[in-house]
Amino acid sequence: MENTIVAVSFNIKHTRYLDESGKPINALPPDARGPAILTALYRALVQTRAFDAKAIALQRTGRIGTYASSIGQEAVSVGVASAMRTDDVYHRAVTGGEAGRFLKAMIDDLEKRH
């Protein structure tokens, strides 16, 4: 019989804002309230998915080299990018390119406004 030693134990708090049908069940956090930020985040998700689809098509036809798809991971990178401050540093992982695209789009948008 093997002995088992628990080296570490932790709990992860789970917070949901929408139910399975998309209906609100909790108030959104302050930094995600209002149509402007939600529209910008959604736009970034859609643009990321479109870029990914195009890159996959180019890779499969031999027009670009190896490409690691980010399908299903867009929200992570877009969310991280949207929470970054100007003095934060982002290190791109293999599938983290969408954060860079989102940051560039945000910077371009800010430059147009000011």
Image (tube, helix red, strand yellow):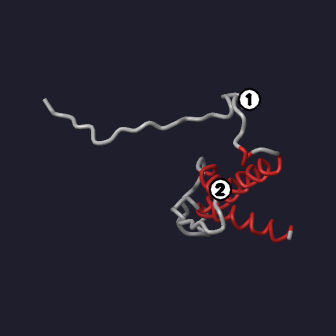
Q: Quadrant of residue 89?
A: bottom right
Q: Nearer the viewer, residue 100 or 60?
A: 100
Mark 2 lies on a secondary structure that is helix
Instruction: Give x and y (percent) for residue 13.
Output: 52, 36
- Reading the chain from its start, which is encountered first: label 2 or label 1? 1
- Residue indicated by mark 1: 23
Does residue 58 appear to the left or right of 93 in the view shown? Answer: right
Instruction: Give x and y (percent) for residue 40.
Output: 77, 53
Q: Residue at x 73, y 31 (%)?
A: 24
Which amino acid lies under the numbered mark 2 shown in the image of this protein? Ala
Q: Residue at x 32, y 41 (%)?
A: 8
Which amino acid lies under the numbered mark 1 shown in the image of this protein? Lys
Camera-side mark, 2 or 1: 2
Q: Residue at x 54, y 65 (%)?
A: 92
Please identify the quadrant where the N terminus is shown: top left
Does residue 39 appear to the left or right of 74 in the view shown? Answer: right
Instruction: Give x and y (percent) for residue 103.
Output: 69, 64
- Residue indicated by mark 2: 83
